[in-house]
Amino acid sequence: MCGIVAATARREVSEILLEGLRRLEYRGYDSAGMALIDAEHNLLLHKRLGKVAELEQAQAMTPHHGCSGIAHTRWATHGEPSAANAHPHLSGNRVAVVHNGIIENHESLREELKGQGYEFQSQTDTEVIVHLLHQQLEERVEFFQALKNTIARLDGAYAIAAIDAENPDRVVAARAGSPLVIGVGIGENFLASDQLALRQVTDRFIFLEEGDMVDMGATRLHVEDASGAVVERTMQRVSAAVETVDLGGYEHYMLKEIHEQPRALAETLGLEASHQVEDERFGAGAGAIFDQVKAVQIVACGTSYHAGLVARYWLEDLCGIPCDVEVASEFRYRARARREGTLLVTVSQSGETADTLAALRGQGEDEFIASLVIANVDHSSLVRESDLVFLTRAGAEIGVASTKAFTTQLVAFLMLAIALGRRHQLSEEATRELIDALHQLPDCVSRTLQLDADIKRLSEAFILKNHALFLGRGIQYPVALEGALKLKEISYIHAEAYPAGELKHGPLALVDAEMPVVAVAPGDELLEKLKSNLEEVRSRGGELFVFADDNAGMKGDSRVHVLGMPSCPAVIQPVVYTVALQLLAYHVAVQKGTDVDKPRNLAKSVTVE
Ligand code: G6P
């Protein structure tokens, strides 16, 4: 999704800005741009539709240099992907703005500004910001005050950074609803929507709070809060080594990340020393909070929501406590009945998803006893704003379609179920068995990865299909949902998942020879029921692709293709079967020739509503 990088220094910053954009590329975007103020105080602009590489090419052809600048990767919300709609946006050839988020009252502002003679060059909501700012500057309002007056006119969510040719040594910025972080250098300061963009130049960061406004020069930092009071925000040193995010010999990041799962799962587990799930894994004070938990409310989006759906089965079955799961964009906008002793659990790979963050922030007073986030990115907004934190150790996930983040979230949830369960109905022996099962997980996943060639062969049957059905029962139903999501995200095949028992209530009408039906069918207690459902498909000419272990005793024939899965403890089957479905989606997409790591229209981190 949209990314911001800005810099003001005593040295030339164009390469720093471009490198920052490169580091944000994985988030998904459709165009990129950069504006600099040169030594003669000219405002210089490059904007390109497409990849950052196109922008680099423009810079190579016509080099722009300057000591202050702003840069952006855009993911279209208002207005099609195009060079004209790419940021930065300019006004009066003196001021430039980059913006993440959405300005809700942009239409009325646009009309007002047009009435004052401003000509709009783009269809974006952002362009109103730069003209409002220009208007202030032309009225000789001081630059930082001009930004304050401008944002007072805006409704919506934003992170904004601006430069002005007549204030060549400054960058001003504001944060309300979209993340923004200051990178502190020596004789230089930076801004970005994600600290990852700046790890090349500094390890010292100031994470801005909601409503903060910034006025910065190369050696000067001034931050005001929403009320206009000057504040000193704490500087944090982010010392963890910058991860290498190269392909490591794989054809795509997604494939690399699928194969990293045994390691990621083992690191997330980290059980070697104690053979226990220590409460402290969830943060200081977790034990006292867990003692009070009588129910759990999980809130998340996309793949992370599916992790919550799997977790519900574990929390209710193993702990015997009620658990609700809801997509964040629905949760945040409805009146909710309270349940005493409920723990709010948000789940998010990025820790920045706008709706999930809004759900956390929008909780009613005393509605929950505490909030816990399961996240993959340290220092992210959800991590900073939650009472308790479980950090998954998936490592940087670049592929837009989430893989290792999902399976490590499942591990986090099983560990949560163990931590809560021992306070309820989980016996010591059952706990030991669960931990033993968790220890087997990396190996079971490794054995599943060895099925790659078989899964690739199966995938060939999907290439010319337009639709696919995924079926599962019980805890395998959310696994089917995640399998269908992976397939549609990256191969653009319309895929739906159903609890197999619902087949007769609608989707069976769709089944014919053109509809591949994927079944998640480990030999569990619901297998016999599932087999009857699969018969219903077979007798209507449907072609079945069944992922099943030996215990399932599934027999293949010309219309039933069975993929023999490794036998593993029942409780970890959702993780193991998910990995097989990830490989299926991957191979279908590769053979269809789609952009596997950056599927069309999707973004890695969705920071707008
Ligand atoms: C986007 C990504 C998905 C992800 C979802 C939630 O849609 O493309 O892969 O599952 O956001 O993101 P989060 O970072 O909160 O897990």
Image: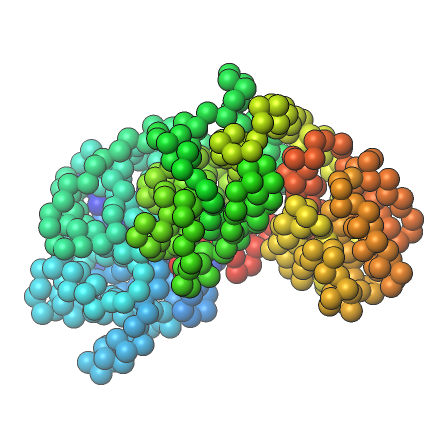
Q: Residue at x 52, y 22 (%)?
A: 276
Question: Where residue 334 sits: x, y (%)?
Answer: 42, 64
- Using the image, determine if residue 392 lies above or below residue 436: below
Res. 350 image quadrant: top left
Q: Residue at x 40, y 69 (%)?
A: 78
Which of these two is toward me, 116 or 452?
A: 452
Question: Where residue 387 sits: x, y (%)?
Answer: 34, 39
- Using the image, determine if residue 531 lies above or below residue 45: above
Is 127 left, or right, of 32 in this rendering?
A: left
Is 139 left, or right, of 42 in this rendering?
A: left
Is 192 left, or right, of 454 in this rendering?
A: left
Q: Residue at x 76, y 46 (%)?
A: 526
Quarter of the C terminus within the rendering:
bottom left
Question: Where residue 115 sits: x, y (%)?
Answer: 22, 83
Quarter of the N terminus within the rendering:
bottom left
Of all residues shown, which one is farthest toward the bottom?
115
